[in-house]
Every structure is written in C-alpha cells, then in structure tokens.
Amino acid sequence: MNKKSRLSLLLVLVLACTAILSACGGTNKEQGAESGSSPDAGNQKAVELIWYNIGTPQKDTDLVMEEVSKYTAEKIGVTVKMKQIDFGDYTQKMQVLTQSGEPMDILFTASWGFDYVQNARKGAFMELNDLLDKHGQGIKETLDPAFLEGSKVDGKNYGIPANKELPAQDVWRFNKQWLDKYNLDIAGVRSLESLEPLMKVIKENEPSVVPFMIDRNYVPNLPYDYIIQNLPMAVKLDTEDFKVINILETPELKEALTTMRKFYQAGYIASEVATTTNNSDLTTTGNWFVDRPTTQPFADNLWSASLGYPVVSTPATDSMIYNWSVMGSLQAISANSKHPEEAMKFLNLLNTDVYLRNLVDSGIEGVHYEKVSENVAKNLDKSRDYDMPTFAIGNVMLNYLSEDDPSDKWEGFRKFNDEGVPAPLLGFNFDGSNVLTELAALNNAKDQFWAPLMTGSVDPDKYLPMAIEQFKAAGLDTIIAEAQKQLDEWRATQK
C-alpha cells in the first residue's frame, strides 16, 4: 500500500534509473504460499540470517523482524536480522563491510547501488545456479525468465532480481496544473524538439516556473544501447553489425546537444543545472512544467499521490529491456555466508509467500496497516515508523493494493513486461579489467565535460570537439576496441 513517507519514483531514477513500486499489505498466515515449508523446521535450532538492505533505517525494523523470524523459524528454520544503510551511503559502506569480511548472508545489490556486475566479478557474491535449482524453484517459476537470464554475469546467476517492471521506458511527465491553465495539448509530444512550443508558453506566462526540470545526470535520449551507462561507447538499438561506436561523434548527439543549448539559452532550463544533483525544492513547490523520468504501469497515479498534485505523462522512448533495467534491484547471497542454503530458502519464501512478503514490506497487520478487503490494505499511523523501499525486497507483485490502486495493477505490470523489447546488449556485461587505466582517465574527462554538454550549459560547437579530443586522449579508442572484442566473443556464444 502507499505509505505517506514512501520515496517517490523520481528519487529512485535519479539514483539509478530505476523506479519505486508502492504497495502494501499482509494476510493471515494460513493464506501464505505453501512454498518453503519444512516439516521439521520447528524442531531444530533456527539459523540466524544477517540481511543487509538499502534504505533509511526504520524505527520499527527490529520489531517487524521479530515477527518475520517467528514465521520463518516455523516454516524454514531460520530467523532474520535486518541491517539497513541509507541510499547515499550504501555503496561505500558495503564496500568496506564486504572487504573486511563482516558477517552477512543476504545483501541488496543493483546496477546503480553496490554495483552488481562489478562485485560479482570481484567475488563478493556466491554463485546461485545450483542453489536456485535446489532451493529456489518457486523463484524460477515466479520470475519472468528474462530476469534470471538477463542478470547472469559470465553465464552465472549471482543475484535474485526483484519481480517488478522488466523493461525501461522514459516519458515526458507534465505538471497538470500548467497544462490545464493554458489548455496545452501533449498528444503530439514525443521528440525533444516537440516540447518547445509548450515550454515557450510557460516561460512567457509563469516566470517563477522552470519549464524543463532536469539535473546534472540528464542525458538526451539517443537510439543507442550503452556498453557502460553514461560513458560514450554504445551500439545502435537497431544494430545489425553490433559495431561499438563513440556516441560523441554521432549526428544524433550533436543534434540533441544543439537543441539542449537552445533550450538553455531560452531560459527553459535552470542556469545552475550542471551542478544540480536533485530538484526536491521544485517538486515540493510544484514550480516545474515537464521532466523525463522512467515509467511503470499506472505511474501517473503513483507520482500524483507522492507529489501531492496531479501529473500526466506521454512516452518519450519505446519500452525496452536493458541490462540496467533487469539489474535494477537484486538480492545476493554473500560469498562469505555460512548458511547459503538457508539464505536461498529464505529468498525463495520471500518471493513466493504472500504473508511474508507483505510483513517484510509493510509491517505488522493491526500495527502498521489494516486490511480493507482480501487484497487491499491501508496504512495506520504507526506506518511512519516502518517505511521500506518496496522495490528492493523481492516480488512486489505479491503486495496488497492500496485503496487508490486499480484492481488490475499487477496484471498491468505483467502486460508491460511481456511487451518489452530486448535491447541488443541484453545479457552482455563488459569486463573493464584490461583497461582500468583508460577507464579512470575517461571518467576524469567525463567529470569535466559530460554534465555541461548534456544539459545545454555550454556551446556544443566549441566544447564537443574539445570533449572528443579529451576522451580520445584518455584512451576511448582502446576501450572501444576492447569492448568490441568482448562483444564479438559474447555474440559467438549466443544461440
């Protein structure tokens, strides 16, 4: 169910590009899925699992985990201790904890948080293929096969993806009050250029409103699939030859940067955009007109509830399944776990058992929420003491609906997933170990040029040639050659 303090979907995408689903619930234990039951689990001493998860530490986490442990001890012979680390600190602190050998069994990872692929290759996570076959049959039956296939690293699974939206699709999201006030029609909006007539109206009539709300992480939509997100190596989305190119030298990027520069000079974009890391002040006041988040089914309802005012959206890109969208939220088993089988049993139960999933997500029935009907629940005042990041803890499609959710919400998600088109690099993960020096130099060049260029803050006619020169001097051509070699080798192994 929606929680009053639930993080908005926008916050999650700035951090990753990914999206937060908001649902809540719980049910009587007898309604829990039959999966994972162990006839003699209650007769053995329970094993304690230590679970590191992303998200702001909550006042009632220990209280809820006590209830979780009562249930899981009976079902599968384990208890659970959850430790939470806030979003901004998660990657750095988990690097220290895993390198020091801190005891842990289960931990959150993603393409954007405690890098999944990188840490799988470093040996931080346990290989899960055999454990999935032995104790994860419920997961394999529940998840769209694209989740497990797309999240393999060098042919092996190291994490269990959350069962949520599978493709990624960007939209132009509009603050509806300004559309209504000036009777603006968004039916023909799709390209970046098509925004201009609407933003012009807002700029001329609402001087306190930012027409185009973006931050320093903005990159124009281009028809490319990136080798590494936000670095200029990519293949075309409609590629037939799978040639890796430098997007800085493409006509599509030059055209987009020219448009962004035009918008910046017209005052459609905030002057300090190249150093802006978030726009929370604008979203709080509503003094913005359009932005570009990544969507999910019924996202307009979620955004409107979270922001406190109505928004509407229209597609900016096609719906495609990328590596980063498949890997947007996973739970891994630590390579140092002393209880890997029990950890997999718990993850299997979490992803298949309605009672457990809603208990972990929404807290204790009668304390943090109450049921309105069989599959609908609403928050109680105590819910402010237990507000979990729903997207980060497994199968969200087991969650009970809020009173504002459409009854076919999860059917909408399944349809959205079925219609997603695989991107050309889905399943390919670049290994940068042979070009670490060049990647470090490339990121230094990016820090200097990327945000100013992408946000329109500088003249692309002057700065784009400078950026190309600096990126090449950093070793971009060497990285592209290495990526091409690995991509060709990977393609040769594909059916």
Image (cartoon, helix red, strand yellow):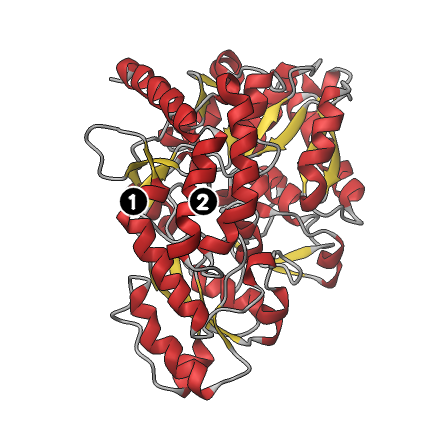
| Three-letter amino acid code at the position of disc 1 | Thr
Mark 2 or mark 1, earlier in chain:
1
Q: Quadrant of residue 95?
A: top right
- Judge whether 410 appears above or below 138 on screen: below
Q: Label 2's element?
A: helix
Cα distance between the residues tagged 2 and 1: 13 Å
Residue 105 makes an appearance in the image: yes
Q: Quadrant of residue 313?
A: bottom left
Residue 410 makes an appearance in the image: no
User: Which of the two residues, 421 or 74, is positioned nearer the viewer here?
Assistant: 421
x 56%, y 44%: residue: 447
Name the residue tied to disc 2. 467
Residue 125 on image: x %, y %: 60, 19
| Three-letter amino acid code at the position of disc 2 | Ala
Location of the N terminus by quadrant is bottom right
Residue 258 on image: x %, y %: 35, 60
- Judge whether 279 appears above or below 401 on screen: below
- Total numbered badges shown on the rendered structure: 2
- Judge whether 323 appears above or below 391 on screen: above
Q: Residues within 10 Å of mark 1 (few under 14, many from 20)?
A: few
Foreground label between 2 and 1: 2
Q: Residues within 10 Å of mark 2 (few under 14, many from 20)?
A: some
User: Which of the two residues, 34 or 411, is positioned nearer the viewer here?
Assistant: 411
Outermost residue toward the left? 240
Q: Quadrant of residue 61?
A: top right
x 65%, y 49%: residue: 362
- Judge whether 33 appears above or below 75 on screen: below
Name the residue tied to disc 1. 250
Location of the C terminus by quadrant is top left
Q: Label 1's element?
A: loop
x 63%, y 57%: residue: 6
